[in-house]
């Protein structure tokens, strides 16, 4: 199944996002400089995720999802490229990228609604990762659309504490013909 790009609605206005995968030197202050650049230029960051890249402590990969309406992509890439610690920038077109996000949610449960929570988890592909007498924590690692669906399904429950990571993305593998 091919994950769809985020084409959601915020305040009833359709939005489109650019996904930038930025390889940076893993040095103090790099993330602050990137965030500062976006703030100074008035570029809106929709999502930001950072982690060490490819098991190499020397580099980190920053996945930045940018609101396309806040600035032209060429301007964003040009400004990022000027930062000293930026090694490489890839613009990932949604159709050419694999996107995933993590959602964790803890819900208050009792005997009356515990089964309903378990049904929502089963129907959305979420996993139960923690349980006690009064709460259940569910997890979903999936497309942004799948996380949106789970979040909407959980709205009917009270006592929900929810956290989403933001997107991470890598280019899709190129399919090669086999002989």
Image (tube, grey):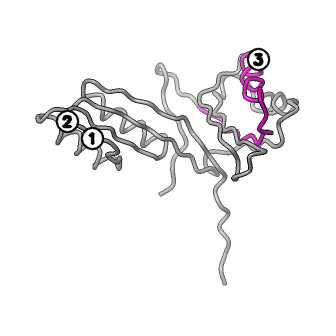
Q: Secondary structure at mark 1?
A: strand
Extent of the magenta region:
16-40
Q: Quadrant of residue 78?
A: top right
Q: Which residue is mark 2?
A: 133
Indicate the quadrant where residue 5 lies.
top right
Residue closer to the observer: 165 or 64: 165
Label 1 environment density (alpha carbons within 10 Å; few <14, some 14–19, many ≥20): few
Instruction: Point out which mark residue 117 bears.
Output: none
Which marked residue is nearer to the observer: mark 3 or mark 2? 2
Q: Earlier in the sequence, mark 3 or mark 2?
A: 3
3D distance between C-alphas at marks 3 and 2: 49 Å
**Residue at figure coordinates x 27%, y 24% from the top left:** 159
Residue shown at 65%/67% (left/top)?
A: 175
Q: Position of residue 30 (x, y in %)?
A: 77, 29
What residue lies at 35% left-to-right and 45% top-to-bottom?
Answer: 129
What residue is disc 1 on? 131
Few, some or many residues within 10 Å of mark 2 (<14, 14–19, 20+): few
- Residue 1 position in % (x across, y down): 47, 58
Q: Which residue is mark 3?
A: 41
Mark 1 touches mark 2? (CB < 8 Å): no
């Amino acid at each position: 199944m091919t994950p769809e790009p985020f084409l959601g609605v915020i305040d009833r206005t359709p939005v489109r996002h650019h996904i930038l995968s930025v390889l940076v030197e893993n040095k103090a202050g790099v993330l602050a400089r990137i965030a500062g650049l976006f703030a100074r230029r008035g570029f809106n960051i929709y999502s930001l995720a950072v982690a060490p890249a490819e098991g190499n402590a020397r580099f980190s990969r920053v996945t930045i999802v940018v609101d396309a309406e806040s600035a032209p992509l060429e301007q964003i890439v040009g400004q990022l490229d000027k930062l000293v610690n930026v090694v490489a920038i890839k613009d990932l077109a949604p159709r050419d990228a694999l996107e995933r996000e993590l959602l964790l949610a803890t819900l208050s449960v009792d005997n009356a609604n515990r089964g309903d929570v378990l049904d929502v988890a089963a129907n959305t592909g979420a996993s139960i990762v923690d349980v006690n007498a009064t709460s259940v924590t569910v997890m979903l690692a999936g497309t942004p659309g799948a996380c949106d669906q789970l979040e909407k399904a959980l709205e009917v429950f009270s006592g929900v504490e929810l956290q989403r990571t933001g997107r991470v993305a890598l280019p899709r593998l190129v399919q090669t013909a086999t002989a």
